[in-house]
Image (cartoon, rainbow, N blue to C red):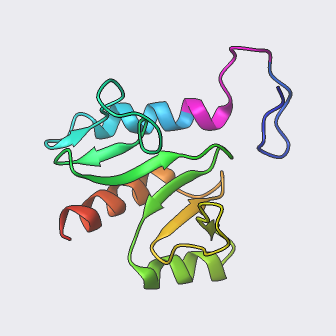
Amino acid sequence: MASKIKGLKKRTVGEKSAAEKCYESIASAMLKRRGVTHPTKTRKGFGSSALWIADRKMFAFLSSREEFTVKLPREKVDALVASGGGRRMDPGRGRPMKEWIGLNFDSNWEDLAEESMNYVSGL
């Protein structure tokens, strides 16, 4: 299976992509924060590998397209999309979500994960 990130070499079965490794690093750092969980054993399906705040609000995950996807205020998503930093998350129904963005690999995932966690915890 080839990596879905442009410019990266093909990988063998079981080998993690650069996006997966980056997500795991960010998840590991975020899980050290109070209230952040990664309930892979208790949740099934969509969001099962996501980062959650207070076990009730999802704020970040790695999509099946290997895009680091975060929830941010609509204005921030608009600005990131306009600058080419990512694209709105579309769950497959042809209606992109207003507050979710799949970030480009060169975006600052760590800072945006932090911003997303703070935004979602304040909702």
Point 45% across, 32% down: residue: 25
Tell me which segment is drawn in magenta: 12-21
- The correct choice, above or below, for 112 with respect to 65 in the image is below
The relative height of residue 84 versus residue 19 in the rendered view (above or below) is below
Q: Is residue 60 left or right of residue 55?
A: right
**Res 111 quadrant in image:** bottom left
The number of numbered discs placed on residues in the rendered structure image is 0
55 vs 52, left or right, is left
Q: Position of residue 20 (x, y in %)?
A: 59, 32
Q: Is residue 71 above or below residue 96?
A: above
56 relative to 17 in the view: left or right: left
Within the magenta stretch, is there residue 86?
A: no
**Point 34% across, 34% down: residue:** 43
**Rendering coords of residue 63 (x, y %):** 58, 46
Q: Quadrant of residue 78?
A: bottom right
Q: Is residue 42 above or below residue 51?
A: above
Give residue 39's position: percent from left, percent from top.
30, 32
Q: Main secondary structure of the magenta part?
A: loop
Quadrant housing the N terminus: top right
Q: Which image quarter: residue 62? A: top right
Q: Is residue 15 magenta?
A: yes
For the point 68% across and 46% down, the residue is: 65
Place of residue 92 in the rendered image (x, y in percent of width and height, measured from the top left): 65, 61
Name the residue at 34% across, 63% down.
Answer: 115
Q: Quadrant of the C terminus?
A: bottom left
Residue closest to the eye, 111 or 20: 20
62 vs 105, nearest the viewer: 62
